[in-house]
Image (cartoon, grey):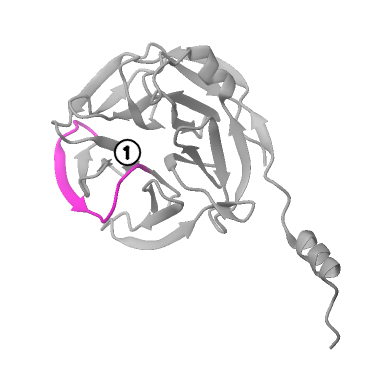
Amino acid sequence: MRALPILALALLAGAAAPPPAPVAPAQVVATFPHDPRAFTEGLLYHDGSLYESTGEPGRSSIRQVELATGRVLRSVAIAAPTFGEGIVIWGRQIVSLTWQGGIGWRWRLADFMKQGEFHYPGEGWALTHDGRSIVMSDGTAQLRFLDPATLRERRRLTVTADGRPVDQLNELEYVDGEILANIWRTNRIARIDPASGRVVGWIDVSALTAQVRATDQDDVPNGIAWDARGRRLFVTGKDWPVLFQIRPPKG
């Protein structure tokens, strides 16, 4: 077979490449108060309340929060020097991570009593679930899918955009068949296809960051919560005084 010219090969390669994922600015629907001393690591919506985990040694906690007022209804502290990370609710328990300790805990949802611990290699950043597996981020471009009963790893998925890995995956939320992920120290939320790992779109929250006038380099967007019944999507950031409700992405 005669070899194709280099130009023809380049055109074929270009034709096979998927188009860049679209970027859409976040559209604010409503705003709510948020604790400006909450270094948000995990955020979720469950039975009418927000549940939030906060980080940093001496400030780490898991809390139930009243949406309308931002008032903390109850909380449990995670003792220093542990750095608390993301959370997810599965059944009647909250599952939580720590950053570099390689240890996570199960907490009883009803009263935040600790019910057990588990261990994992590497760092722990965030958690969500897809109804079958608990999904975990660790700061890399990979997502881990865990067995909810044992919290043992089932598989991993590499997240890519334009054919390249996307690392620094942080807070997660499962929304309408996609995994949304904050990208650490950026103003973008990735919309990830959980079958392929490909980023199918981006939500740009730059205007929200500008509105809160964050001054510390770590006070970045982090925290995504989905009210599936009410179809409300909430986002916030570390030490932000505002929680934003934004329009959910369209397919």
Across and down, in percent, residue 207 comes to 58, 19
What is the total number of numbered labels drawn onto the structure image? 1
Q: Is residue 186 visible?
A: yes
Across and down, in percent, residue 31 comes to 51, 14
Task: Look at the magenta stretch and give its main secondary structure.
Answer: loop
Q: Nearer the viewer, residue 39 or 109?
A: 39
Across and down, in percent, residue 178 comes to 55, 46
**Would you name the residue on which mark 1 appears?**
87
Q: Residue furthest front?
A: 6
Residue 137 sits above or below residue 45 on the image: below
Residue 188 sits above or below residue 75 on the image: below
Residue at 70%, 46% (x, y): give it: 20
Residue at 44%, 16% (x, y): give it: 214
Q: Which residues are magenta?
A: 109-126
Residue 120: quarter of image: bottom left
Residue at 42%, 60% (x, y): give it: 156
Residue 209: in magenta span? no
Q: Nearer the viewer, residue 92 or 160?
A: 160
Residue 151 sits above or below residue 58 on the image: below
Residue at 39%, 56% (x, y): give it: 145
Residue 233 sits above or below residue 202 on the image: above
Q: Quadrant for the N terminus, please.
A: bottom right
146 sits to left or right of 80: right
181 sits to left or right of 64: right
96 sits to left or right of 180: left
